[in-house]
Image (cartoon, rainbow, N blue to C red):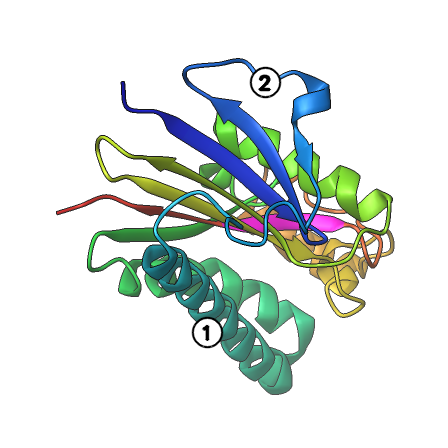
Amino acid sequence: MKMTLTVGVIGGLLLSTGLSAKTLQPQDSLATQQETEAVILAGPEGKLNQARTNAKALGGALKARLQQAIAKGGLEEGVEACYVAAGPIAQALKKDGWTVGRTALRVRNQDNQPDGWEETQLHEFADALSKQLPMPLEASRWNEETGELRYMSAIVTGQVCTACHGNNVDPAVLGIIREKYPEDTATGFAPGSLRGAFTLTYSPE
């Protein structure tokens, strides 16, 4: 029987969150870094490295576009840029069997709502950050039978993020957010908390 294994790395620890052939008990879910030196995340190492590269590319492209917009027209322009550019940037990275995107427990764009697996990993990430466990925060799920690999990497709220996602967003900026994203729930974040995660799926072509 082929098995699907889900694991997450939190501060160098291996967290197993699902195994199709067996329900893991809480005492079985954590292994020390020494015990897991040979196995960090579920899935082929080459594909995991591709996932990390693609997540970094998405984050880098979004950050560059946002910085450019803010420099040109302030935070209001930054919100506009995110609204217009986020989708095309993710679409441009959709190649070689990969889809890339972002998700969160509280989203701005409702298209980014997490599915069940993503929501579980997001809660694990948030718990790890609340305990101030060291980075990286990653999770993966690999289906050995189909070759599908899912990967997530946490996005931590930085100080600059709070200008549009914090507790004291400028009213003018908040007005644009509400215009573009009427169902927005992505405010009230504090620096160091979980903003969300990059989420990627590889499906063999």
What secondary structure is found at the residue carrying circle 1?
Answer: helix
Q: Is residue 37 above or below residue 79?
A: above
Q: Is residue 197 magenta?
A: yes
* Image position of 99 with respect to 74: above or below: above
Check disc 1: other Cα within 10 Å, few if <14, some if 14-19, many if 20+. Answer: some
Please name whichever residue, 42 or 154, is drawn nearer the observer in this view of the structure: 42
Give, as a three-letter code, the residue at label 2: Leu
Q: Secondary structure at mark 2?
A: loop
Marks 1/2: CA–CA distance: 38 Å
Prevailing secondary structure of the magenta residues: strand
* Residue displayed at 22% across by 60% down: 95
Quarter of the image with the N terminus in it: top left
Q: Is residue 155 above or below residue 63?
A: above
The residue positioned 38% from the left and 45% from the top of the image is 43
The range drawn in magenta is 194-198
Front label number (1 vs 2): 2
Give the side of residue 94 with respect to residue 187, left or right: left
Q: Would you say residue 34 sits in the magenta stretch? A: no
Percent across and percent down for residue 160 are 76, 70
Evaluate whether residue 114 shows in this view. Answer: no
Q: Indicate the quadrant where residue 104 lies.
A: top right
What residue lies at 48% left-to-right and 68% top-to-bottom? Answer: 56
Q: Nearer the viewer, residue 197 or 37?
A: 37
Say which mark, if any, is on residue 160: none
In the rendered image, is residue 115 in sight?
A: yes
For label 2, the crowd category at 10 Å Cα-Cα, with few meaning under 14, some 14 to 19 and many 20 or more, is few
Residue behind mark 1: 61
Between disc 1 and disc 2, whose residue precedes?
2
On the image, the x and y values in percent for residue 161 come to 72, 63
Image location (x, y in percent) of residue 58: 44, 66
Residue 30 at x, y = what percent?
69, 34
Label placed on residue 24: 2
